[in-house]
Amino acid sequence: MTRYKPLTTLIHALLLLASLSLVYAHIQLHQTAHLGHGDAASREWRQPDELNDNFPMPVGSAQFTLDFSLIEERVWRADLSTIIDSQSDVDSAHRKSVDGSLLSLLEDISALYSEDEISRLQLLIKKAKPGNSGETLAGLLMQYRAYSQQEAGIEEEIAKANKQQKVGLLKDYPQRINALQRKYFGEAVAYSLFARQNISKRYLYKRQMINLQTTLSEDKKYQALKEAEASYRIALDGLSR
């Protein structure tokens, strides 16, 4: 039996070595986890050194909670050429209106993201859509957010007004909304962005105003509504594309 003792001793030595290795690994893992939960500053996201020249101000760890994927594809597809052209075109006869997709994108960004998030989106859009298009779209974001808040105030005022007040507010709406759009976008860009929407809203508000007129007979209301519809179609057909 004694001839098997060296083999038994070797096996015991290997088992002891394996046990010691496991203990060491456990200690190392525990120390790493402890350090990871220690100093919060050591885990703070910092901007990579290679970006410092172009973007010297750290954007902070909060940026990584921003879900750019919600609008990324639409940002890529957004056609800013009409807006860019309108910024340099002083001839109002040649102004064009954009389709609804760009305005819809601005509306959704304003609804989906906070003001701080939109500030970060501006940086992402400039990187995702380089050149004048990205700069133009990024610039429109904050302009539209500020505009939309005041536009909502005007529409809420109309919605909450009594019947007598509402007629006057509906009548004044085109002038008020035009002034607000020019304030934030300038006349040329405002036309490009809102011409189609303005025609539709004015038609809907014109219908409301006609229906609220207590001095009109049913026949006169019907005639006025038909005339409003005809004017609406003519205005849509007259939009430059």
Image (cartoon, grey):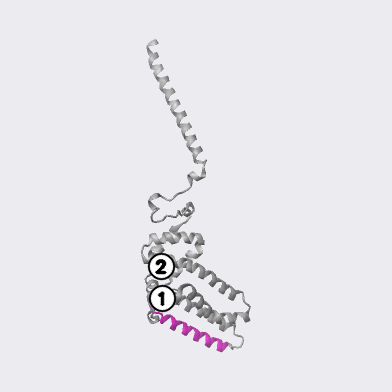
Compared to 85, does 18 lie above or below? Answer: above
Residue 240 forms part of the magenta stretch: yes
Query: 110 or 186: nearer the eye?
Result: 186
Q: Which residue is mark 2?
A: 136
Any mark on residue 241, and which? none
Quarter of the image for the N terminus: give it. Answer: top left
Which disc, if any, is residue 97? 1
Residue at figure coordinates x 46%, y 66% from the top left: 141
Q: Nearer the viewer, residue 71 or 81?
A: 81
Q: Amino acid at mark 2?
A: Thr
Magenta span: chief secondary structure = helix
| Residue 12, x across and y down, in percent | 42, 20
Query: How many marks are shown on the rendered structure?
Result: 2
Task: Tell me which residue sits at (51%, 68%) in the image.
Answer: 146
Q: Are marks 2 and 1 in contact (CB under 8 Å)?
A: no
Task: Indicate whether 146 appears above or below 31.
Answer: below
Q: State the residue at coordinates (44%, 62%).
A: 122
Span of residues in magenta:
218-241
In front: 5, or 99?
A: 99
Q: Give SS at disc 2.
A: helix
Which three-letter amino acid code belongs to the residue tagged 1? Ser
Label 1's element? Answer: loop
Q: Is residue 234 above or below residue 83?
A: below
Q: Please say if 206 is above or below 132.
A: below
Q: Position of residue 175 (x, y in %)?
A: 52, 80
Mark 2 vs mark 1: give the one in front: 2
Q: CA distance from mark 2 to mark 1?
A: 16 Å
